[in-house]
Image (cartoon, rainbow, N blue to C red):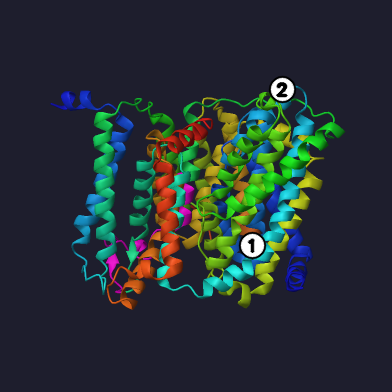
Amino acid sequence: MELLANLSIGFDAAFTFINLLYCLIGVTLGTVVGVLPGLGPIATIAILLPVTFTLEPVSSLIMLSGIYYGAQYGGSTTAILINLPGEATSVATTLDGHAMAKQGRAGPALATAAIGSFFAGTVATFLLAAFAPPLAELALKFGPQEYFSLMVLGLVASIVLAHGSLLKAIGMILLGLVLGLIGTDVNSGMQRYTFELPELADGIGFVIVAMGMFGLGEIIRNLENETTRTSVVKGITGLMPTKEDLKRMAAPILRGTALGSILGILPGNGALLGSFTAYSVEKKISKTPERFGKGAIEGVAAPESANNAGAQTSFIPMLTLGIPSSPVMALMIGALIIQGIQPGPTVMTEQPALFWGIIVSMWIGNLFLVILNLPLIGIWVRMVSAPYHLLYPAILVFCGVGVYSINSSTFDVYLMALFGLLGYIFSKLECEPAPMLLGFILGPMMEEYLRRAMILSRGDATTFLTRPISASLLAMSVVAMAIVLLPAIRRTREVAFREDG
Amino acid sequence: MMTSVAARIQNPKDFWTGVIFMTIGGAAVILGREYPFGTAFKMGPGYFPTVLGALLALVGLITSLRGLLRSGTAIGAFAYREMILVLVATVLFGLLLRAAGLIVAVMLLVVVSAYASRYFRWGVAMALGVGMAAFCVLVFVKALGLPIPMFGPWFGQ
């Protein structure tokens, strides 16, 4: 069994004291971030990225991915306790999770989320291990045409999944692509849009953009109407779900895991789509749909399993193709590049310990989340209502020191402030920053692949359509675009995202 | 003149988003004229940015036009005070980091930014500033060994 052999390489890599420690730090930090007000995984990973310079590649990736799925977990905790989704993926959980909490069943709701997430995480880890090698093999056949088309699909998917206006999402992507081109052109060595500033010759670091838009911009937005969050739940008594609960949650967990795993692979934050879809599927097939929204345990089990499964399988395009499907994955790629590893299909063959170590560490991380977080729930409850006015100055300090430490450049600190301003303005205009960040990261790569493809085809643009893989990727983009433009789907999409606000 | 245009904007959020897109897209095209465009076969450094900039400007134009025609809600009030304090605190941090050193820069960043909160208390903010400065020195300078001076030339070091 090659699968088992591969997993055992992973276990060897992940089961060292130091990597277990970083995994633990990652998931704990992630949970804290998910629970604390006003700090998301994107800003946190961006802040911690400079710290990972000094770590081994495996350790740093293990810690960063721990933050990512730990934050999902913390996000569901706040969704259940205070009706505020810590992450967008836990929006669906608020509906029934918080209803359960109000009925004094916060304990079982949290336990259901944990059990569902763990089960989904386990399945998704195996899926990742099973599907990554063939996908990486396929990717080795990719030429620049396929990579370009794949990025188009990724960008289209992030448009589809962005909140609100499609037109604005398209604009934000283009804006990101344009800003990503600032710096020296790799082909000609020409400096573009640098205004003759030497600090811009290497382009703008995506960490600066991420910290500015998701760190600073978010802080200003939160200060607009600063309120202290209060938890309706003061103490949690009785975590264990009843026998009846367990019976009810089993099938939704299975369905949620399946849906989440499939949708998670899609570029453009499929985990988000997974949790919404899983919730509506449960409601649709339930014999008692009227219970939904009033504390139905199925409404917690399904989306929670789906979002965790999706969070895990969203690593597949990143690890096998080197293509980020979401800003978080883009930061992971950044972390790899910093370590001198070029993400892509060759990582698996050239760095098997790293590749399989990360995959196995996800399963370990999920185990940590279950065995540590349920007993620690009392602490999370108290953290939920942590005073924001003490938190945000500290976040600013981490952003400032973090951004400075990357290049020892104060210019980067000013740039971060500029992107903070931009992020705030865009939030007032209801423009999503995530597609912009994705475009920003993909911009230079897309240009590179486009130019290479066009040289290979001697300027014939049909090359993207005559190669089967590239053509099917583009066809998928067109279908995805067409689907959201259909009036009926467009309306449900808008409704689905409105529940967020 | 201005008022008549302003009165026609049905959806200010869309309108101004479009203006930003048009400005940046237009700037990309105009500045990009200095870079060789090349052909589809051999694309020059100006090709991709010009195409993208033009597309961005076009999307901006459509967004703005839609903002004139379709009704929407007004842009919420900007929290100018909070925005300026947070941004000034950050820039101040950058200015002070090398000259005055990490300790002073962090303390000022904390106190100035904390002033933006409605729950601001001098004592609490100062204590937080001292705490964060100590934390940064211990973690970033001592433990991680980042090359940031604790005290800058202002203190004769």
Residue A378 falls in image quadrant: top right
Res. A60 mark: 1
| A374 over A475 or under it: above or below | above
Query: Is B98 displayed left or right of B56 in the figure?
Result: right
Q: Earlier in the sequence, mark 2 or mark 1?
A: 1
Q: Is residue A403 above or below residue B35?
A: above
Kindly identify which chain the residue marked by label 1 belongs to: A
The mark found on residue A268 in the picture is: none
- Whether the magenta-drawn stretch holds residue B66 is answered as no
Of residues B4 and A496, the one nearer the viewer is: A496
| Chain ID, mark 2 | A
- Name the residue tied to disc 2: A102
Dots 2 and 1 on the same chain: yes
Q: Is residue B38 above or below residue A94?
A: below
Q: Is residue A191 magenta?
A: yes
Q: Counting other residues with Cα less than 10 Å from the Cα at mark 2, is it few (<14), some (14-19), or many (20 or more)?
A: some
Residue drawn at (75%, 49%), measured in percent from left and top?
Answer: A119
Asked whether A496 or A217 is in front, the reply is: A496
- In the displayed structure, would residue A118 be above or below residue A90? below
Q: Which residues are magenta?
A: A188-213
Q: Is residue A52 visible?
A: yes
* Residue type marked 1: Ser
Q: Position of residue A429 (x, y in %)?
A: 37, 35
Residue lying at the far right of the rendered structure:
A243
Percent across and percent down for residue B82 are: 44, 32
